[in-house]
Amino acid sequence: CLTIAQRRDGLLEIELLAARVESLRLRFIAAAGDVAAGEGARDVATWLAHHTRSDRAENARDERLARGLDRTWNAVAGALGEGRVNAGQARAIVWGLEKLPEETPPEVLRQAEAHLVAEAATFGPRELRCLARRVLDVIAPELGEDHERRALEREEAHARKHTCLRTRQRGDGSTEIYARVPDATAARLLTYLEAFTAPRHQGGHQQAGTDWAALAYDQQLGHAFTALLETIDPTRMPLHGGDGTTVLVTIPLAGLRDGLGVAGFGGDDVITPGHARRLACTAQIIPVVLGGRSEVLDFGRRRRLFSPTQRKAMAIRDQHCRAQGCGIPAAWCEAHHATDPWSHGGNTDLADGVLLCHFHHQRTHDPTYDHTRLPGGTIRYHRRR
């Protein structure tokens, strides 16, 4: 039985031998063009795939690397043969060197190659790729800045050209959204979404015993995206059809009061009455209440929404979500008609308003839950039986 030190030394020795064997293999690949041609193969990669039952795409990558080491990157080839770099490091270095501008002077290329080979004594393939992208900043700063600027211009142009967004209704009440946007746009969106999820990471919803703690990160982002769209100020959006971006929700009066049936939402789509009531509390929608013969009984205006001044006053008064046990701060909460819902003739005044986090606001309008407003203003929830 080998000792720990022997196993350690043995592993390192095997890795060294593996690098040398890979170096020898690549040298043979670089010189095997006539072998492939002699058997009518298109290239060495195809010949190898046939005789060794290996993957042609991987062989093709190895063939390109072999040619580069044989013809251009002699310092990397030498380091691989001596075991000073492994195959992964060699691929990363050559990848970075071949990304440098074509007009880079030969002496600068040699300096960059030597620098990256030296860095391989400390860093692995992933780090070497990052270093290779900025190697000109170290070797030739005047060239590096210009190269980075032009590379960014190309990347930005490519991102603008391929920017798109597609949606597909799944038929189960949800829609898939695929978007390809510039990196800066994606970073901005994530900043907004993580601003919504941040309080939940601080334990607010976990203290309330909700399901947020069990949600995966991508699920939290999905819920945050929903909350973001519901809190966008439509007065700052471009006009759409002569008016700000506004959604009409049509619902029968009985459904609005009793929570039965469905509500028409944004055209042919439908939502539950509970969802419609919650949206009417905070989102910039116009509820169109219909009578028995579909006549318009009420064409609700945004006066049903709490004003920014009222919202600030509630924030000072409530400090956080008023659901029992929830500590989500007021800045992340939504205003709700707590005493008399507007669908039952309630007024949009400060005394009637209460702050609830997004989760508890949804639960308030969930027909499977009841809620009670306690004397101090706290709201307690319990599942209906």
Image: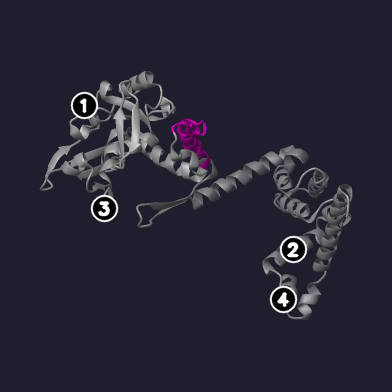
Q: Which residue is mark 4?
A: 50
- Which image quarter is the N terminus in? bottom right
Q: Which tag, 2 or 3, sits closer to the chain's start?
A: 2
Q: Earlier in the sequence, mark 3 or mark 1?
A: 3
In the displayed structure, 382 sits above or below 5; it is above
Q: Main secondary structure of the magenta part?
A: helix
Callout 1: 10 Å neighbours few (<14), some, many (20+)?
some
Which of discs 2 and 3 lies nearer the camera? The answer is 3
Q: Earlier in the sequence, mark 2 or mark 4?
A: 4
C-alpha gap between disc 3 and disc 1: 31 Å
- How busy is the neighbourhood of tag 2: few (under 14 within 10 Å), some, or many (20 plus)? some
Camera-nearest residue between 101 and 196: 196
Q: Earlier in the sequence, mark 4 or mark 3?
A: 4
- Residue corresponding to mark 2: 62
Please give left or right for residue 303 compared with residue 236 in the image: left
Q: Position of residue 378 (x, y in %)?
A: 35, 25
The answer for how far apart the CA atoms under marks 4 and 3 are is 56 Å
In three-dimensional space, the C-alpha distance between marks 4 and 1, rounded to whole angstroms, equals 79 Å
Left or right for 278, reference 151:
left
SS at circle 3: loop
Label 1 sits on a secondary structure element that is loop
x%, y% of residue 107? 82, 47
State yes or no: discs 2 and 3 in contact (Cβ < 8 Å). Answer: no
Between disc 2 and disc 4, the foreground one is 4
Q: Which region shows up in magenta? A: 186-208
Residue sitting at the far bottom: 39
Q: Which mark is residue 268?
A: 3
Contact between marks 4 and 1 (CB within 8 A): the answer is no
Q: Is the residue under label 3 in contact with that under label 4 (CB below 8 Å)?
A: no
Residue 3 position within the rendered picture, expressed as x and y whole percent measured from the top left: 88, 50
* Residue type pointed to by label 2: Asp
Give the residue type at disc 1: Asn
